[in-house]
Image (tube, helix red, strand yellow):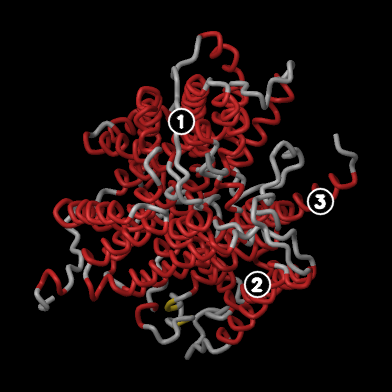
Amino acid sequence: VTEPSVGAGGAPSIDLPDAGFLPEPDAGPGGTPRSPMLRTDRVAGILLLLLGAIVALEARTFRVAFLTDPLGPRALPLLVAGLLALCGLVLIRRPGPEPAWPRSAGLLRGGAGAGVFLVYSLLMQPLGFGVSTVAAVAGLGLLFGGPPRRVLVVGVVTTTLLWLLFVPLLGIPLPMGWIFTGGRG
Amino acid sequence: VESFALLGDGFLVALRPLNLLLVFGGVMVGTTVGMLPGIGPINAIAVLLPVLFATGIPPESGIILLAGIYYGSQYGNSISTILLNIPGTASSVVTAIDGYEATKQGRGGPALATSAIASFVGGTFSILGLVLLAPALARWAIRFGPAEYFALMVFAFAVLSSLSGKSVAKGMVSAAVGLLVATVGLDPNSAVPRFTFGQLRLFDGVDFVVVTLGLFAVSEILHLLAETEPGKEVRTSVGRVMITGKEFAASRWTMVRGTIVGFFTGVLPGAGGTIATFLAYSMEQRISDRDGTFGKGDLRGIAAPESANNAAATGALIPLLTLGIPGSGTTAVLLGALLGMNVTPGPLLLERNPEIFWGLAASMFLGNVFLLVLNLPLVRFFVRILELPRWMLLPAVAALTFVAVYAVNASTLDLLLMTGFGVLGYGMRRAGFPLAPVILGVVLGPLMERSLRRSLALSGGDWGVLFSSPITLAFWGAAVLGVLGPVVLRRVRRHLPPA
């Protein structure tokens, strides 16, 4: 039995006056204690200040030739930039409890997963839907701890099912890539 | 009385063969994705959107299908919660307390049956509330001008931001990030490109399907990768899936109370199912826990949150359909779906598109009956799906997500953006930033900016227009209360001795 994904995932948890019967969601395993100066919330706060500044600078370049409305295209981005910076300051001044980050092996697996997604995104067009999907499914399967030969089978089956679903059934074209079109497509 | 005549017309819509098939398909898909880790109703709906738009399906059929996934997932969620202690969403966390305890005592079957019946009671009776309350709310909201809408949206953001995370500041950051993403592209008023960095592909803005699937589907897979200990797999046994008449009689008033609490909590934008389940459970504990059996596998501890949960899901459709203001991540995606099918939810929806509102309401009656009748016999089948190892299921889910997004625009940039939002979403959920306000921001952003600019254009640039009517003042007051309320309550609790 795995841990509840809500608590461990840091996904929505709420603070109500009588929510005391819930276990503390942050008490997961593998939390790395850090020095009080470099807390996650402080880092996030600094990033938000930066983001707010970038948004504000960029928004100042939105120029209109003629006045369409009193506010113009700048107003909302500037308001948002202010809100981001304000919340960033709050997080720097009063950071919350440190969340539990997974162990480095877990983060490594997650990073490898992001790498698979990145390569898949880049190869879908040039390599075609078929080859890239088989490879991506098999790669992710390996990362989830599947046996090598069987993840390849899952990759081929998934790709075939997706092709059946999209191309003949729904009539939505997918890029087939040079392998199937002999370099013409 | 008039409502019921219109509901009759709605049944004529819902009983068309295509729509009947879609209700059935929707609730089955909903149950499955609600149960499985890594998918969830938001992802299922977002994956389906490009396909629905491409097929040009009539909007009432589209929303019947998507809503079926939405409320069907509430049923599915309780299966994995009760049997495996894996609540797929925050609104099932409470069910796990008594539900998983019952499973450990070998009473998983009765627990599942209680959950299904309570879900049915909550789901069905709340449709009556929807049918009665929505037309009244629409008649009232018809007077809203842009300033009222702006204040209402601020209220929805304030409540969702302050309630969906632990920290109000983090919730507001999430909403701001969503609003920022919404501004990418050509400004609709002046045609000035904003945050496009010279990319022509970005002039149309970032598709909210891409953002949603990145934040929820991709980040969930990254999260599961980071958490998985390879080799751990799921096994469970169900036992007899039924409850005795005596067990039902003990919890029938619990279900009624849960439905009422859940429905009214669900109607409030931002509050939603999670709070409804907490309220229903703690209220029920106070009313009927005489022998201290709550938390030890008491079936009433399942009936209360499950009826509340489903009633809240229906209640949340009211602000969505009559005001055009969603109060949660999933209803925000439903709003995007309606807008994508050229339907603008709002006070005029009931007059202009009666077939959508009444057809949907009628289909929900049918859907809940399907769910009750099918769920109990099919529990064993669902458990088999749940037992599929993660290395089989999750890569296939990821491939479906990528292929569906690519199929819309054939854009590599969309895939890259989705991956980027996946990494961002993982970091955000890890650092405690809630994701639902981001989606709300992306979907509501354009509407919010339009109403802000329109009200200031009407007033000639005077910001006072935003505070000029009693209705706007009420929404602003409620927004301030929504943000400050939880903070104040937390302070008060700190000064009180523990009860």
Report helix, strand or loop for mark 1: loop
The answer to whether residue B139 of the structure is visible from this angle is no
Residue, disc 2 = A84
- Judge left or right: residue B439 versus residue B365: right
Going by the image, does A20 lie left or right of B37?
right
Q: Which amino acid does label 3 sit on?
A: Val
What's under tag 2, amino acid-wise? Leu
Label 2 resides on the chain identified as A
- Residue, x 25% and y 36% (percent of image)? B21
Viewer-side residue, B176 vs A108: A108
- Name the residue that disc number 1 marks: B236
- The chain that hosts pointer 1 is B
> Cα distance, mark 3 to mark 1?
44 Å
Residue B334, image x, y percentages: 42, 51
Between circles 2 and 1, the one closer to the viewer is 1
Near mark 1 (Cα within 10 A), the count class, few <14, some 14-19 or many ≥20, is some
Between A55 and B388, the one nearer to me in the picture: B388
- The vertical placement of B451 against A68, above or below, is above
